Image (tube, rainbow, N blue to C red):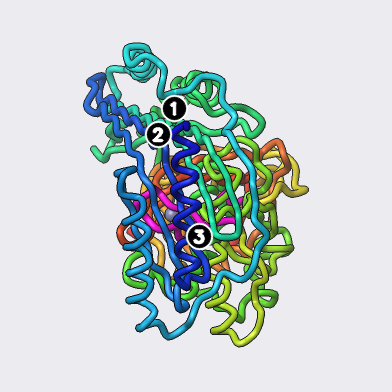
Amino acid sequence: MSLYENMRNQITGNIQRMMKGGASYSDARWYSDDSCQQFMVLDGNLEGNDTTVESGVGVRVLYGGAWGFAATSSLQDVNRCFDRAMANAVSASKLVKVRLDMGSMEGVTGEYTSPFVTDPIEVDLAEKVDFLREVDDSLKEDWILRRMIRVQIQRLGIHFWNSEGSETRRHLVNTFAHMTAMALDSQRQMQRRSKTLYCDPSGTRGWEMLTNPDLWSGHSDRVKDELKQVISAPELEFGRRSVILLPGQGHLQVHETIGHPLELDRILGYELSYAGGSFVGLDSFGTLRYGSDKLNVSAYGSIKNSPGTFGFDDEGTPERDYLLIDKGILVNCLTSRAMISEANQRAGRQVFDQSGGASRSTAFYRAPIDRMTNVNILPGTDGTLDDIVSSTEDGIIVDNPTSWSIGSNREHFHFGCEIAWEVKNGKVTRVLRNPSYQGHTIEFYNGLTAVGNESTWTVEQVENCGKGEPNQVMELGHGVPVVRFDNVVSGERR
Ligand SMILES: [Zn+2]
């Protein structure tokens, strides 16, 4: 019997045992492989070269309206792991106020493999380091004070079974990279310019993604050129003006002020003690005007190549493309199946009817929680970046965050950015340093006056979204066009 057949028999047998013991639902994830490599090259020195390999089983049991979770890295310990999950659920069932259920869903079977040509974990270590040194070399200049290259590669094999007969297998590959150059400006303040590896949405995500110069390494000359302009540029003055976000900044704006506030567990208060809450309430869906009618936001978005695309979530739900915001009106949230019954019970009516396929866990030893998949602003009808600039009277174009500070309920935000280009009367006039902008989330999105077309839309990667206690770091994507917001407070009062 193969290891897979052996594990399948053990896990499905135990799931049946839990159901006979009174569970209303049970599932298990076996990570046959969870390999990760991280590299950091700082000023040409290989400062970080870490490899981790993990494998094991995580089990959930729903009993008496309460969850129990347990995990083990020993494949000899699977039976006892199920027993521990059941014991945890039985204990918790004596304390629950809202009895949870998973609703009903037909069992799902399927397999998903991330698109890739060359498995990035299997590439020879020397070849990896040589490539990163080459990228580092391309950033070298006398006037550049610090160079930083960071790369993270992941490979996962995840097998899922549940008590409804679902059986899914996933083989996931992710490749992340950042390059940053830093230099002192005339005030002896450190300035930076960076480039993050982004996705060709119809491309692949193996080693070939990292070495494709269009997506990352070929940007070093532009990074240096723009940094040189920043260090001799005047500072952005405080005032209200239009702010045009390039996707390098727009994706974080979406992440922090649309993605996080629309996570259902966060709306229900599960993250209050750590990541925070949400200004969105259960009564906001279908009624709240989140933004102008130019704002259309989707979850997943049928993006083939993204870290937020994974076939099936950690409850076996197939990925689902749906709108979160429709012409400015909030219509849906990011959710697992597990949160829906609680939300509907608390609202006293059916607010949500199906999972968003957003139940995700960072490792076999963490219980899945509600996470972002791909949260995207859909392309609009306001043309190219040049078209948007030409219709802007007084504004700035900004790219890439240097700092961010977000209200705990995501109702306010303040971002610092690496670079701004001033726009006066439809023309880009000069580069400005220390750009920043701030706002009230709802007011800001209602000031959305231009959404770029498909030519301005890129899929940006996030590999370090933090949430959950104990912390779970998750990877995801954001497809965003160039977007313009009017009457935005920007710059700092000095
Ligand atoms: Zn996040």
Q: Is residue 335 visible?
A: yes
Q: Amino acid at mark 2?
A: Arg
Location of mark 3 (residue): 16
Q: Which residues are magenta?
A: 357-376
Residue 108: say if magenta: no
Label 2 crowd bin: few (<14), some (14–19), many (20+), radius 10 Å = many
Disc 2 CB within 8 Å of nearest ligand 1 atom: no
Location of mark 1 (residue): 223
Label 3 crowd bin: few (<14), some (14–19), many (20+), radius 10 Å = some
**Observer-nearest of 72 and 41:** 72
Find the distance from the CA under tag 3 to the CA under tag 2. Answer: 55 Å
Q: Amino acid at mark 3?
A: Gln
Q: Which image quadrant for residue 327? A: bottom right
> Which of the four quarters of the rendered structure image does ligand 1 lie in?
bottom left
**Observer-nearest of 493 and 418:** 418
Residues at marks 1 and 2 touching, judged by CB atoms closer than 8 Å:
yes
Indicate the position of residue 28 as horizontal and vertical percent values. 46, 53
Q: Amino acid at mark 1?
A: Val
Label disc, if present, on residue 193 of the rendered structure: 2
Disc 1 CB within 8 Å of nearest ligand 1 atom: no
Under circle 1, the secondary element is helix
